[in-house]
Amino acid sequence: MIIEPRMRGFICLTAHPDGCAQSVKNQIQYVQSKGAIDGAKKVLVIGASTGFGLASRITSAFGSGAATIGVFFEKEPAEGKTATPGWYNTAAFETEAHKAGLYAKSINGDAFSNEIKQKTIDLIKADLGQVDMVIYSLASPVRMHPITGVLHRSVLKPIGGTFTNKTVDFHTGNVTQVSIEPANQEDIDNTVVVMGGEDWAMWMEALQKAGVLAEGVSTIAYSYIGPEVTEAVYRKGTIGRAKDHLEASAFEITDSLKSINGKAYVSVNKALVTQASSAIPVIPLYISLLYKIMKAEGVHEGCIEQIQRLFSERLYAGKDVPTDEQGRIRIDDWEMREDIQEKVKALWATATTENLPEIGDLAGYKQDFLNLFGFGFEGVDYNAEANEMTLIPSIINS
């Protein structure tokens, strides 16, 4: 069928299999162009199908020659209905990995559940024995708690008072004021349950109990801090509480892995266009200004550039992993440079609907958003018939 982007608010309802494949190939080429990384050889990626998780899987496989198992929750295709982009990304990743002689298998299901944890453990035992790296990159708005059976929903709200600031509708380019009512305690608690570190710790405990973690295993989860302009709705809001919990969990996980000399890290990454960040008021305007400045300074990065640098210059640089005083790896260092943040601040103060096309990079934002769903790639004929029924090799054969 001919597949076009169909938008509804902050989401695109369609995805293009050939465009997603092109995206994966571009990321693989980037990693290969940067040379080999002396990294982990057996890697589990939880949240492996899009964004930083996918970039981590690609960097592990094509930078370090790793065997990878990917866990994710994607909608599969049906006749005349496309799958979600992560499904097509994974189909392309597995195809390319197999061509390169690399082991790659995937599990599609709710990573928060005990059932998927057990399925993953069984697969590691059967095929790899143990893993020496676990990447935790889950982003979900809801979590069914595996012990209580309660469904928790996360919210994006400030804490303490109503937050009012500028935002942009990236489809129309309209800059407006937005007000967000503050969270109550239940909102905060639910967000911490969904997006905090409890599930990461549960994964590590289950994997360790099952004996599938190698001596000296590392695990890493991804976080974000961001600038003053977004902090009320992000770092000092409900999601910030969840990130605090995630970051604190790293120390607890490291303690629990002592017997096998394991270590848990949190990497603070830069602001990027993702399905999640597009839905957060204020963030799209911040990103469009940030992109403009970082591109002008020659320090702009997407997911794959970020993760390739994280792996090659931090995790596997052959020396102690540098962290900040809270024990976090700071790969947001270029975004948070003082000169860059000062420029963003100055532009923020003057941003209007009229001048945003000139002072910001709204076109770059839109392009990145379309790319998430496999649209807007050079070398893809979007007028040609595409096979929406593209399948993931290891999932058909499992």
Image (cartoon, rainbow, N blue to C red):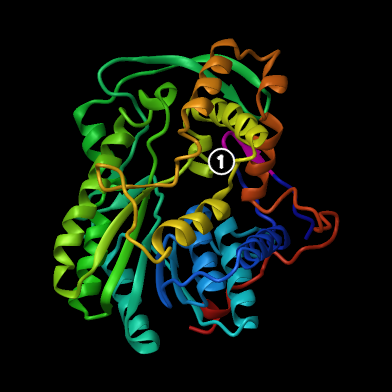
Left or right: 212, with 281 as reference point? left
Query: Along the horizontal axis of the image, is 393 left or right of 318?
Result: right
Q: Give the residue pinned by disc 1.
A: 273
Q: Nearer the viewer, residue 256 or 37?
A: 37
Residue 74 in view of the camera: no
Residue 170 image-quadrant placement: top right
Where in the figure is residue 359, as x and y percent of width and height? 67, 20
- At a point 19% along the width and 67% down the height, the residue shown is 205
Give the residue at the far bottom of this rendering.
126
Q: Position of residue 145 (x, y in %)?
A: 24, 54
Residue 26 painted magenta: no
Q: Residues within 10 Å of mark 1 (few under 14, many from 20)?
A: many
Q: Secondary structure at mark 1?
A: loop
Q: Residue furthest front?
A: 319
Query: What's the magenta bit mostly, secondary-structure-wise?
Result: loop
- Residue found at x 38% / y 85%: 128
Q: Residue at x 30, y 21 (%)?
A: 182
Q: Which residues are magenta?
A: 6-10
Residue 300: x %, y % from top left: 60, 41
